[in-house]
Every structure is written in C-alpha cells, then in structure tokens.
Image (cartoon, grey):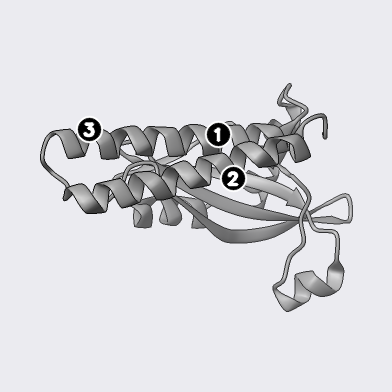
Amino acid sequence: MPLATTNQLPLSTITIDGVPFSVTLIITHDGIEYIGRLWFAEVHNDEALFAGEIEVDAGMPDRGVLPGRTEVEVVSLANRLTDEELLARYHRARAEKRRYHGLRRVTVEILSHIRYLNQVAVSLRRGLLDVDAAVQEMDMTEAQVHALVKSLRDHAGRE
C-alpha cells in the first residue's frame, strides 16, 4: 500500500448554537500507522445536508489524532466518539491559533504527496517497484502537487 494515502470519510453532523457542522474523518498513513484527524466544517445549505450533499467552507482540523494499525481501527475509534466528545474536539479545534485553515489543509496535502513521491522513489531504487509503474506513479503524483500549488492562491489570505 502506498504511504501517505488520504481517505476522507463523512463521520457525523453536530449542531453548535443552532448551526450544523459536518465532521469528516481524514485518514493518512505515515509509514508506521494510520492516523485519523477530524475536520469540522460549517454546513451552508440545509437542503444539501438532508440530501447528503453537504456544501462546506474550508473548515478546521482537530489537533488530536486517532491512531490505528489499520484504517478500520481508526474508523472504529472515530465512530465510538460521542456527540459530547465531538463537541469538545470542535472547541479544541476552534481554539487553535491558526486562522488560515484552508491554506494549511492544502499545505498538508502537498507535504503528504511529497512524502509519497519520495517513498515511491526509494522503493524504485531498492528494486521493489516496476520501473514503468513507478515512473507513471511519480508523474501522476507530481501533477497532483502542481495542481495543489496552483490552488494555493485561492486559499491564501482566507480565514
């Protein structure tokens, strides 16, 4: 399995002061274990919420992590969180000093792709990957990084 893959799973919706927030679980692999982080984003469209098509703003991450040996373990940990625990994690995320969460999110994605690119290159040099497949994977990852870099301007300066 490639390192630093990212999966995003809708987890729940919580209401804070009458405002619905979607809670998404973002899972990455750091080469040792799977790491889950919660992402909170205000839902802007009630009809979309009920239809399952949630439109969200840039949102904000929880600083805490949910580690596991497998993605299933991370999802299980996240699913065991009560609404009160999700609310506490939301308040912790809200207290975070960073203001430009959208920019941070893209930066984290870029770093994740760079780590993956490096792992593919290391695996190729060790003879663990087919040359053609590795080159194709590296080209695709590089293109994704370029697309993310182009999107930085859209996120810069936005709270």
At 39% from the left and 46% from the top, the residue drawn is 139
Work out which residue is located at the far top of the displayed protein and give it: 97
- What kind of element bears circle 3? helix
Which of the two residues, 18 or 53, is positioned nearer the viewer here? 53
Q: Is residue 134 above or below residue 53?
A: above
Q: Is residue 21 visible?
A: yes
Which of the two residues, 44 or 149, is positioned nearer the viewer here? 149
At 54% from the left and 59% from the top, the residue drawn is 9
Name the residue type under label 3.
Val
Give the side of residue 121 with respect to residue 7, left or right: left
Crowd band around label 1 with a 10 angstrom C-alpha radius: few (<14), some (14–19), many (20+): few
Question: Which residue is under mark 3?
Answer: 122
Give the side of residue 94 with respect to residue 135, left or right: right
Cα–Cα gap, marks 3 and 2? 23 Å
At 55% from the left and 40% from the top, the residue drawn is 146
Choose top left, top right, bottom left or bottom right for residue 13. Answer: bottom right
Q: Is residue 82 visible?
A: no
Which of the two residues, 151 or 94, is positioned nearer the viewer here? 151
Residue 145 place in picture, x, y as percent: 52, 40
Give the side of residue 140 with respect to residue 109, left or right: left
Reading the chain from its start, which is encountered first: label 3 or label 2? 3
- What kind of element bears circle 2? helix
Crowd band around label 3 with a 10 angstrom C-alpha radius: few (<14), some (14–19), many (20+): few
Reading the chain from its start, which is encountered first: label 3 or label 1? 1
| Disc marking residue 147 | 2
Question: Which residue is under mark 1?
Answer: 108
Name the residue type under label 1.
Val
Q: Is residue 10 above or below residue 86?
A: below
Cα–Cα gap, marks 3 and 1? 21 Å
Residue 125 place in picture, x, y as percent: 16, 33
